[in-house]
Amino acid sequence: MIPLEEIQKAQRCLEGVTVKTPFTHAPLLSQRVDADVYLKKENLQLTGAFKLRGAYNKIASLSEKERQKGVIAASAGNHAQGVAYSAKIFDIPSVIVMPEATPLLKVQNTKALGSEVILHGENYDEAYAHAMKKAEEEGLTFIHPFADDKVIAGQGTIALEILEACEELDYIVVSIGGGGLIAGVASAIKQINPAIKIIGVVAAGAPAMYNSVQAKVTIDSVSVRTIADGIAVRDVTPKNLDYILESVDEVVKVDDEEIASAILFLLERQKLVVEGGGAAGVAAIMHKKFDFEEGCKIATILSGGNIDVQMLSLIIEKGLIKAKRKMKFIITLTDKPGSLMRLTDILKEVNANIIQIDYDRTSTSLSYGDANVTLALETKGEEHQEIVREKLRAEHYDFREELRV
């Protein structure tokens, strides 16, 4: 484990730099799972994620000569902003290599902090290889996002803040990408209160650490694909695997649908914007991926909030459809005055609110004299949707439904 003294030292180093983020009870989530659930809101950290803690602690440990040469990092976004922010504080040059598919928000935020941004590779690991090559060629100090003891110690300061707020916990649930966050948190917790169980959560589309923990040897993935871009790590670092095997009680997986449902729950019910990696812990709790006792106390870390707005829009759209709060039809009408009004009157009768409408009379697939009307409706659940369908059938409408989940 990382020595507790190193984590405490990192906490002193971070004073006045990072925010002691809120740690609050989540009553609606608690009620849903019959346990007391608490949220550590690192999505409200400066730069929008926990990564600032480790990045600053590492850069602060460098010699003046090392800092003046500049630093470089590879990141899907949150570590990038942590390094860029820290480099700005120290007034030193920084270069960030990001995968080409990194959300635009994270790229823009990193550039705004003064870093040079290079987009390279399909995933973190390809970006990492490019950054390491550039570091060697130009004499830059590489700031690893998770496989560095100073970085891990910085991340571990979150655990100290959690225990300051609530000592009597049964579980702490932590998302896993490269493993730096959970290594730091678990190191601190197991040295202070080893009775608290640490649960790690990986995305099913990036299962390398899960597979490695099961086998107790490093097993890299061939590829990764998940909406949780912040934890989409393909390869396992042996050092971090050893830390996890030593101090983490269980590692579980959540799929993209479960992550999306957690993001939507946090947005709608907790009024919190959280990215995929940050919501993985909530997803594991919501879908009971590990066994916990009724009434126990569970904390989870919302590790980041830098979600791409287009991804968030898609998650909201799919979530509304899955919850039967939205439905979409394509209905064929006779293209004559009054046809559309008759249809809208019928929908009014069943209290279905039209939120989007499109009228197509030119498609070559239509018969002469017909038109397709695409309707998006706001509905009140499965029973209400079935009433809408039955009414349309009773009125002899030719329709097909889209977006059913």
Image: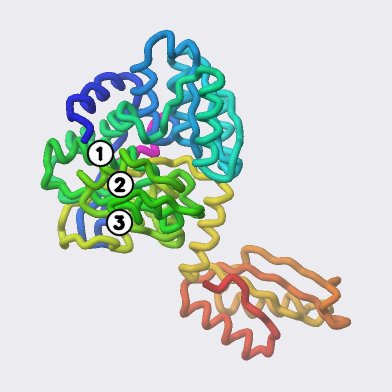
**Element carrying mark 1:** helix
Q: Which amino acid is tagged 3?
A: Ala
- Residue at coordinates 15% horizontally, 50% vertically from top-left? 170
Q: Which residue lies furthest to the right in this view?
A: 368
Q: How crowded is mark 3: few (under 14 residues within 10 Å), some or many (20 or more)?
A: few
Q: Which of marks 3 and 1 is in front?
A: 3
Q: Can residue 275 be seen in this view?
A: no
The residue tagged 3 is 215
Closer-to-camera residue (405/347): 405
Instruction: State the extent of the magenta-drawn residues as a range.
Output: 39-46
Compute the Cα span from label 3 to label 1. 23 Å
Any magenta on residue 80? no
Compute the Cα span from label 2 to label 1. 8 Å
Q: Is residue 266 left or right of residue 4?
A: right
Q: Which disc number belongs to residue 174?
A: 2
Any magenta on residue 45? yes
Q: Is residue 66 left or right of residue 389?
A: left
Residue 198: image x %, image y %? 22, 48
Q: Which amino acid is tagged 2?
A: Val
Residue 356 picture quarter: bottom right
Compute the Cα span from label 3 to label 2. 20 Å
